Amino acid sequence: MDATDQKRLLREMLFARRFEERCAEAYHERQIGGFLHLYPGEEACAIGVLEKAQTGSDYVVTGYRDHIHAIKSGMDPKALMAELFGKEAGCSKGRGGSMHLFDPDVHFMGGYALVGGPFPLAAGFAKAIQLRGGQEISICFLGDGANNQGTFHETMNMASLWKLPVLFICENNLYGIGTAIERSTVEINQYKRVAPYGIEAAQCDGQDIDIVMAHAEKAVNYVREQRKPYFLELMTYRLRGHSMSDSGAYRSKEEVEEWAQRDPIGIYKRRLVEAGVLTEDEFHAMDKAVQDEIENEVVRYAIECPEPRVEDVARYVYTEGGNNHG
Amino acid sequence: MAELMYWQGILRAHDEEMARDPLVFAMGEDIGVAGGTYKATSGLFAKYGEQRVIDTPISENSYTGIGVGAAMLGARPIVEIMSVNFAWLAMDQLMNNAAKIHYMSGGRIRCPFVMRVPGGTAHQLGAQHSARMEKVFMGVSGLRVVTPATPRDAYGLLKSAVRSDDPVVIIEHESMYNLKGEVPDDEFFTPLEGVEIMRPGKDVSIFAYNISVHWALDAAKKLASEYGIDAEVIDLRALKPLDRAGIAASVRKTHHAIIVEEDEAPVGVGSEVMAIINEECFFDLDAAPVRVHALDIPIPYNHRLEKAAIPNAGDVIAAVRKMFGR
Ligand SMILES: Cc1ncc(C[n+]2csc(CCOP(=O)(O)OP(=O)(O)O)c2C)c(N)n1
Ligand SMILES: [Mg+2]
């Protein structure tokens, strides 16, 4: 990977961080409502994996912590922020909200609120790809907590049985809201849980984007060439609360501090500075440019564009012509 | 015009749609090699192969979700749940995903998903195999719910459901698969909305659907010959959306309304139809509308108790006679 790409990746992670922090501000100002789940600390997961996928062509699905997966899949951050602000120009026309982002144009197939709900959808995308005879793959990002749902086991069985081209990415951040993984789960190494289903799997550091990309490349190639599922577990940590209403009282200061030392942006920035790809000054300039872009283009757009018309409240319940036949 | 059994109508619709469009596929428990619990998919496995006629593991929620995911990419799954009682396990994928994706995505993603479920009380199958669930499905925004009463509509509704871009639940009946009836030889489509007048009449409107249409027709015959009451029998057929105008039109003609359902009364088709009558044509009524329905109990095993729990033509006749004082 050359210096230009390295700097681009760093900027993407920085953009993700600043975007989420700006969302938190807008939430406190009540411009964003509902539940808001942010991604700081986990940026290397979505960005590293999708860097190695064919975004725009491969299909991506995830849970409610979905902003960065959507952006890296190719969604315009303006349409995303407009959605969070509930606007008609939002990616889901203001009907979805933070947890329900959609952009079928770039094959980002959504954010979903029900833990474990997207597993079968991802396998279904792969089934449609299989029927059409395409070369795309389906990529499903979910948390460690989702693996205790029945859909995890049911879907692993069917995906393996029917050789569906789906890549399961487990973002293991060690918690499901306030419950530590060892208090909810017997086998805490998630990648070991798919072995009975005959699915190849690996576990790696999710904080170092170079490591994530190395594993993701292998995983993506495996699914694309073998046309069968693969499971990759990324060890990560969220630096903020589960959602905006979470005090985080269940984690010790020391633990959070320890993981903050392994901030994916810090790790990658240090590496680039040490390699002479980037100077500290350039990093600060990059940070400033990112924040300006978010403020002047993204947030401004979201503020200025109009809300949906109340007369349209019942639009989209059915498709137009859903009763058509013949 | 050929005489077909109900199951043969369903089979013919599958076969025609699968022959026409390679993205139509069927999945469910024992539908392939075994040919389906009620033969409704028999022969399809040999004709279309295991990629399109899929015997699933006993994982209702996740194979429903796989169907939903495939539908989101434009495939057209026909998912059979062996008995409507097992559809409770698929409710998450059906209610949270299939029904809501089009709306949540601001109309950007369609979900042309079809679920077929045999429902209703057969003979002594016990409480866990005799439930009716239409009240549950018809309460969910975004779904279409239809219920064929004849072989013709078993065929025509499945044809329309496969072509619709909305998610459709088709509730069949375990006791009606061998019912015979005329089905036109030429391809045709039963609309997914609107009532059908099965027997025109001027004195009382009997609203029914699925198996209760047959009780109503039997009752109407006897009411005419023995009591001189000319009953109009309306097949509601589409339970969601319900045809408000069609219901009101019949009541405006007869000024009397009886609603017959196999389901227990609380929170059901009868209460909904009665509410519509109230809202649309209350002042056209000459008598208070009456519901004929099952007892509000789990369906018992003993054949006498089972019979006592479920209404029949005699109950319809009794209700009409009481209304007219004859
Ligand atoms: C079916 C369901 N049950 C419970 C919840 C409430 N809930 C939301 S997120 C969450 C924890 C999920 O943890 P994990 O899968 O590890 O994802 P993370 O938030 O850590 O990324 C819970 C219990 C839900 N949304 N859906
Ligand atoms: Mg977690």
Image (cartoon, helix red, strand yellow):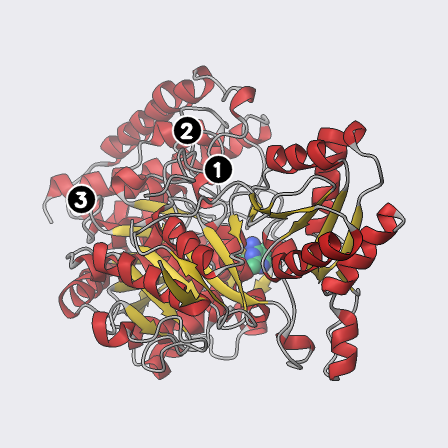
The residue tagged 3 is: A6
Label placed on residue A96: 1
Q: Position of residue A296 (x, y in %)?
A: 36, 18
Label placed on residue A90: 2
Indicate which disc, 1 or 2, sits on the residue closer to the N terminus.
2
The kind of residue tagged 3 is Gln
Indicate which disc, 2 or 3, sits on the residue closer to the N terminus.
3
Q: How many marks?
A: 3
Q: CA distance from mark 1 to mark 2?
A: 9 Å
Above or below, comparing residue A34 to residue B38 in the picture: above
Above or below, comparing residue B142 to residue B309 in the picture: above
Please indicate whether residue A246 sits to the left or right of residue A158 in the image: right
Q: CA distance from mark 1 to mark 3?
A: 34 Å
Which residue does the image show at 80% across and 48% down from the upper left?
A: B290
Q: Nearer the viewer, residue B282 or A243?
A: B282
Q: Residue furthest right?
A: B325
Chain of the residue under the numbered disc 1 shown in the image: A
Q: Position of residue A117 (x, y in %)?
A: 47, 58
Q: Secondary structure at mark 1?
A: loop
The kind of residue tagged 2 is Gly
